[in-house]
Amino acid sequence: MAHDCCSKKDDTLALLAEKKDQRRVLIIVLAINLAMFVAEFGGGLVARSSALMADSVDMLGDAIVYALSLYALHRGARWEAGAAIVKGAIILAFGIAVIVEIASKIANGVPPSSSLMLGFGGLALAANLTCLALLWRCRKANVNMSSTFECSRNDVASNVGVLVAAGLVAITGKVWPDIAVAGVIALIFLRSALKVLAEAVPAWRTARDVTSESCR
């Protein structure tokens, strides 16, 4: 009996330590993403780059995602799954917003500054690789952390796309590489939103059913 009690206590302490580690990681990546949103969005405006602005808005979206993850962290499986559903909806909204920006750029396109795109894109890539490394150990902890890791991985892909676009803009002097990469980023957003929602909605339903059963 005493052994069972100690075993349960050890499990509880291990779970609390795991949650504390997840919280620390989320706070760090939240701060990184907020700082990079301000820097990259400003750079996108100056450079007139749709790809850079789309990538920066993704940074803001991720900051919101990390804040939701922190809020849900100690509130149980249903809250964690619910937070993941909200994340999926946010990612979907940003994908649609990027598509709107692309349409505007096609109508009134001016070639962006490739040097500014390279500078801010490289800075954003370094920031997101740091976030990805921090989240790596927690990526399979639960649906909440899994969806958070998915967002960070998308960011790295977006950053690489911005750098590719910057190189092509420098070579061609045309606006189409910026538009093309912004389009790819939008597709990544839409794919990621569907993936997160496909995992989160069933998890939320399962958690809801378990909660309902326990209340009977």
Image (tube, rainbow, N blue to C red):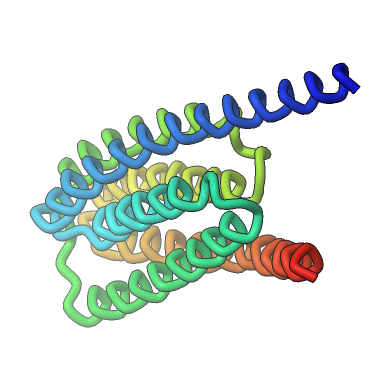
Measuring 34% from the left and 48% from the top, which residue is drawn there?
A: 162
Is 11 drawn above or below residue 182 in the view shown? above
Quadrant in which the C terminus is drawn = bottom right
Q: Residue at x 21, y 36 (%)?
A: 119
Q: How many marks?
A: 0
Residue 56 drawn at (x, y percent): 28, 53
Residue 206: quarter of image: bottom right
Q: Residue furthest front?
A: 1
Observer-nearest of 35 and 167: 35
Instruction: Using the image, determine if residue 188 lies above or below residue 133.
Output: below
Instruction: Please indicate, yes or no, whether residue 121 appears anywhere in the rendered image.
Output: yes
Q: Where does residue 197 sit, x and y in percent of width and height?
A: 62, 67
- Where does residue 20 sit, x and y in percent of width and height? 50, 29
Q: Is residue 129 visible?
A: no
Is 208 on the left-hand or right-hand side of 17?
right
Task: Identify which residue, 64 or 152, lies in the foreground.
Answer: 64
Pinpoint residue 93: horizontal percent, then vertical percent: 41, 73
